[in-house]
Each structure stands twice: as structure tokens, then as C-alpha cells.
Amino acid sequence: MPNMMAPPPEPTARQPGGAVRPQSLRSALARGALGRCPRCGRGRLFRAFLKPVDRCGACDQDWSLQRADDFPAYAALFITGHLVAPLAVHLARDTSVSPGMAAAITLPVTAALAIGLLQPCKGAIIALQWRMAMHGFQQDGAAGGEPPG
Ligand SMILES: [Zn+2]
């Protein structure tokens, strides 16, 4: 019986160089942020919290070519800062909230957001690198890396 919860396969477009990629960047980013394979949407992208799988179990896309490095952490902290700063300013202006209570609210929220956004940010960044054929994904499935010369 087919999996009724899985989204229908998206039409793909053949890119220059023969790579098959989803037609929209938005779809690839959403799949990556949800921890699904940006290429097919069926396989898992992560084997551990921040460890991507080497290859998709469904479509065999090579994810070892990703080079997200520290960018997911920068993105997660950027988003967290923009969400928590208005809360912190609001709590600082509210005279009925003590500084200790404001810290007791903002610090756990900050930690939860920063940690909780790491994997979605990494998945979206891997999807962005793959969709834009950046870094090792230039050759998409080949040995990877920069072309010689
Ligand atoms: Zn896949």
C-alpha cells in the first residue's frame, strides 16, 4: 500500500549538466528545512541532529557534497535575535516585570529557538547549495569538488 502521507512527487526540471532538480527553490528549501531530501522529498536528510546522511535512501542523491559549515549557526542566531529582541525590549519596558523574571523568560526562549532552528537552517542551507549547484553540487552526483584547472 502506498504511503498516503507522503506528498506527491514534484515535477522535475533537467538542469544544464544533466542534474535533475525540483522546479522551485521554495520547494527544495521547505524540504530541507523539514529534514527531508531536497531532491525527492521522501528520504531523510539527517542521520543525527546535525549530521546529514551520506546518500538519500530514496533517490541516492549524494549529500556528502554539502558544505554548510558554520552558516546554519549564523542563520539560526540571526533569526533568534530578530524574534527575541522585541520580546526583550517589551519586557524591559514593562515595569511590572522584574529584571530577573525578564531574564527567566528570555534566556530559555533564546536557547530553545537557537537550538531548535539549527537543524531546519542546516537543511535549508544544504538545499540551497544543492539547488543552486554550489560547491560540491556543481557536478551533482559526480566525484564533487571544483573542476580541475
Ligand atoms: Zn532523495
Image: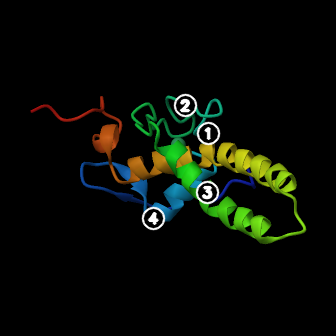
Of 63 and 135, which appears nearest the observer?
135
Q: Residue at x 85, y 69 (%)?
A: 95
Residue 103 spot, x, y in % from top left: 79, 51
Give, as a three-letter code, the residue at label 3.
Gly
Looking at the rendered structure, the secondary structure element under dot 2 is loop
- Mark 1 or mark 2: whose residue is earlier in sequence: 1
Q: How far apart are marks 1 and 2 (CA)?
A: 7 Å
Q: Foreground mark, 3 or 4?
A: 3
Q: In this view, does 36 lie above or below 88?
A: above
- Amino acid at pointer 1: Arg
Tell me which amino acid carries mark 2: Val
Residue type, mark 4 in image: Ser
N-terminal label among 3 and 2: 2
Disc 3: which residue: 81
Q: Give residue 149's quadrant in the image.
A: top left
Q: Residue furthest right?
A: 96
CA separation, marks 4 and 2? 23 Å
Question: Could you say whether the residue bearing mark 3 is in a helix, strand or loop?
Answer: helix
Furthest-left residue in this view: 149
Is the residue under label 2 in contact with that under label 1 (CB below 8 Å)?
Answer: yes
> First in sequence: mark 4 or mark 1?
4
Residue drawn 68% across the image and 67% down it: 86
Say if disc 3 is inside 8 Å of ligand 1.
no
Give the alpha-carbon distance from disc 3 to disc 4, as whole Å: 29 Å
Q: Are discs 4 and 1 less than 8 Å apart at CB?
A: no
Q: Name the residue under label 4.
A: 24
63 in relation to 29, above or below: above
Q: Which of marks 1 and 3 is in front?
A: 3
Q: Measuring 76% from the left and 48% from the top, which residue is drawn there?
A: 107
Describe the element under mark 1 as helix, strand or loop. Answer: loop
Give whichever of discs 4 and 2 has the lower sequence position: 4
